[in-house]
Structure formats: structure tokens, C-alpha cells
Image: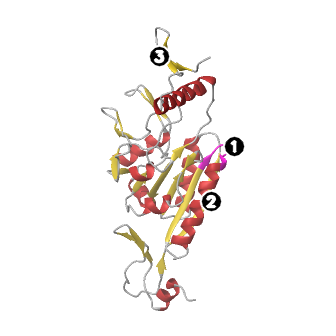
């Protein structure tokens, strides 16, 4: 079966990239004949990583690749490539991955950290927003947990993604756990390095490599967005030490729920002077 690209070449049309209109990814309108054909998006999925990746990340990644290939790829709207950089220093790996994407003339770059969970249509959903750079908000991997997206640096204000949050929101900094960006933004940025870990005396804290890149975007007047709806479908994985205290709190909560539901007064509340806890009868 003759592809649309072959038809375009036969009819002498100029190179055209796929377009996003009204949240729909489609082929562009017919252009003036010049002898060339329609060109799909060229998307590179870039993953910096260390020695081991979680199995559930690979499960999500395989589903994302298969789903995207069956939607964009099957309709000749996008070509996909995968690039993984294994190393120690995250800012160096990101710099190398970005250099590779530029050399390979990618139109879009999907940053994916290998400790993330995400739905199979994540790339498609980000692409449909039709903005220069958009990612997700997610929790860090320590207790007490906090959001990674920063609404404003001065005053320091975190961006919250709650049950009621929806749509896109502009922020100053995002984590690069799952981010889609147009490669055209690089035309407006200062010369490399584009990723650095630096100490910021004003904040009395370290500025990570992803926040450093967002600063460059801000200096160039490029808005950074988060997708609240997709954020709620994603997760940030980390190792967790399960202790007896966690089991105790959980079981006390179960006993309390059962007592309230069944009116079981054999399970009672006792006070040690400082706090209340539920205990099982002897």
C-alpha cells in the first residue's frame, strides 16, 4: 500500500512536519509543490540511568513504546528512537543525551527517569498540549514527602497537584522525571553546558541540573508547564524500609475501623497519658 509520504513525493509537495491542532495530532495541510514529502515528528526517548532499573519501570516503558508505535508510528506521524546513558553524574548524562538528540536532528525529546511510573499514553498526552516544554509534578523520594515542581523561586512556593488540580499550569522549575520538549527551544538558549549542579548562595541550597535547565528556559522567555491530570497518573519509585512501627500503625487503624463499623466494645481505646491507641482485648 502506498504511504502518504510516497503520495506527497509523487505530487511534489515540500517537507512538512506533523502538526497538533485542537489536541489532535495529524498530518499538515497540503503545501505548495516543491518535490519533497511529508515528514513525521522525530521523537527520541532519553533515559539517564545508573546500574539497575526497576522492573515496573520497564513494564511501563514497554507499554508506552508499543502504544505510541501503534498510534503515531502506524499512522506515519512520528518516528521514535530510544537513547539510554549509563553513568554516575546525572548532569553529565543529561548533557550527553541532549547532545545526541541535537546531532540526530530530533524534533522532540522525551526525558524519562528510570525510577518513574507512567501510563502507556503519557507521550501522546504530553504531545497533544502543543507547547515548548511540558512535564509532570510528582513527589520526591524522602519523608516528609514534598512536590518537586516549584511555582516561584522568590518567594519559594511549591506547586501542589491535588485531587482538584486539572489542566496545565506554568511553573518556574520542574523535575525531569517525565518531560517532553521541542528541540527548537535549544535555538534560544545560552551556549552549553545546559545541565549543572550548582550551589546557590541566595537559596543556601543546591540547585539541581533540571532546575538549572529551567532557569535557562526562563532567561530565554520560554514557559514551562506541568500537566496536573497526567501527574496524578504517575509515580516516583524508591526503596523503602518497612519497620514494625509501620505495621503497628496500620493494624491500629484497621482495629479502629472494625470497632466503629461493628460496635465491638471489646476493642477499646486506652490512654498512656501522652497518646491514645487501640488495643486488642487479652
Magenta residues, start to end = 48-55
Tag 2 near tag 3, CB within 8 Å: no
Q: Residue at x 39, y 58 (%)?
A: 132
Q: Is 266 above or below relative to 129?
A: above
Mark 3, residue position:
276
Of 222 and 226, nearer the camera is 226
Q: Residue at x 37, y 86 (%)?
A: 32
Residue 152 in percent (x, y) is at: 32, 38
Residue 88 in percent (x, y) is at: 64, 40
Mark 2, residue position:
62
Taking the image as shown, residue 66 lies to the left or right of residue 264, namely right
Which image quadrant: the N terminus? bottom right
Q: Residue at x 52, y 59 (%)?
A: 102
Mark 1, residue position:
51
Of 228 and 93, nearer the camera is 228
Q: How is the image coloured?
A: secondary structure
Badge 1 local density, few (<14 within 10 Å), some, or many (20+)?
few
Amino acid at each position: 500500500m502506498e504511504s502518504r509520504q510516497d503520495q506527497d513525493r509523487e505530487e511534489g509537495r515540500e517537507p512538512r512536519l506533523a502538526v497538533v491542532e485542537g489536541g489532535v495530532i495529524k498530518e499538515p495541510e497540503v503545501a505548495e509543490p516543491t518535490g519533497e514529502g511529508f515528514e513525521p515528528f522525530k521523537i527520541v526517548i532519553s533515559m539517564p540511568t545508573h546500574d539497575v532499573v526497576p522492573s515496573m519501570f520497564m513494564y511501563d516503558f514497554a507499554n508506552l513504546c508499543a502504544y505510541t508505535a501503534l498510534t503515531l508510528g502506524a499512522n506515519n506521524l512520528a518516528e521514535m528512537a530510544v537513547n539510554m546513558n549509563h553513568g554516575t553524574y546525572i548532569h553529565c548524562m543529561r548533557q550527553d543525551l541532549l547532545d545526541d538528540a541535537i546531532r540526530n536532528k530530533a524534533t522532540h525529546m522525551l526525558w524519562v527517569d528510570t525510577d518513574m511510573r507512567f501510563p502507556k499514553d503519557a507521550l501522546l498526552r504530553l504531545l497533544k498540549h502543543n507547547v515548548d516544554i511540558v512535564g509532570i509534578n510528582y513527589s520526591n523520594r524522602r519523608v516528609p514527602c514534598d512536590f518537586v515542581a516549584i511555582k516561584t523561586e522568590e518567594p519559594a512556593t511549591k506547586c501542589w497537584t491535588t485531587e482538584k488540580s486539572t489542566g496545565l499550569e506554568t511553573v518556574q522549575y520542574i523535575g525531569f522525571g517525565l518531560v517532553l520538549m521541542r528541540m527548537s527551544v535549544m535555538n534560544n538558549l545560552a551556549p552549553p553546558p545546559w545541565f549543572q549542579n550548582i550551589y546557590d548562595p541566595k537559596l543556601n541550597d543546591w540547585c539541581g541540573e533540571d532546575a538549572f535547565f529551567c532557569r535557562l528556559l526562563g532567561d530565554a522567555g520560554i514557559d514551562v508547564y506541568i500537566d496536573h491530570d497526567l501527574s496524578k497518573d504517575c509515580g516516583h519509585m524508591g526503596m523503602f524500609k518497612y519497620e514494625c512501627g509501620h505495621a503497628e500503625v496500620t493494624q491500629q487503624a484497621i482495629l479502629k475501623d472494625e470497632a466503629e463499623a461493628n460496635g465491638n466494645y471489646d476493642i477499646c481505646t486506652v490512654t498512656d497519658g501522652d497518646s491514645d491507641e487501640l488495643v486488642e482485648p487479652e
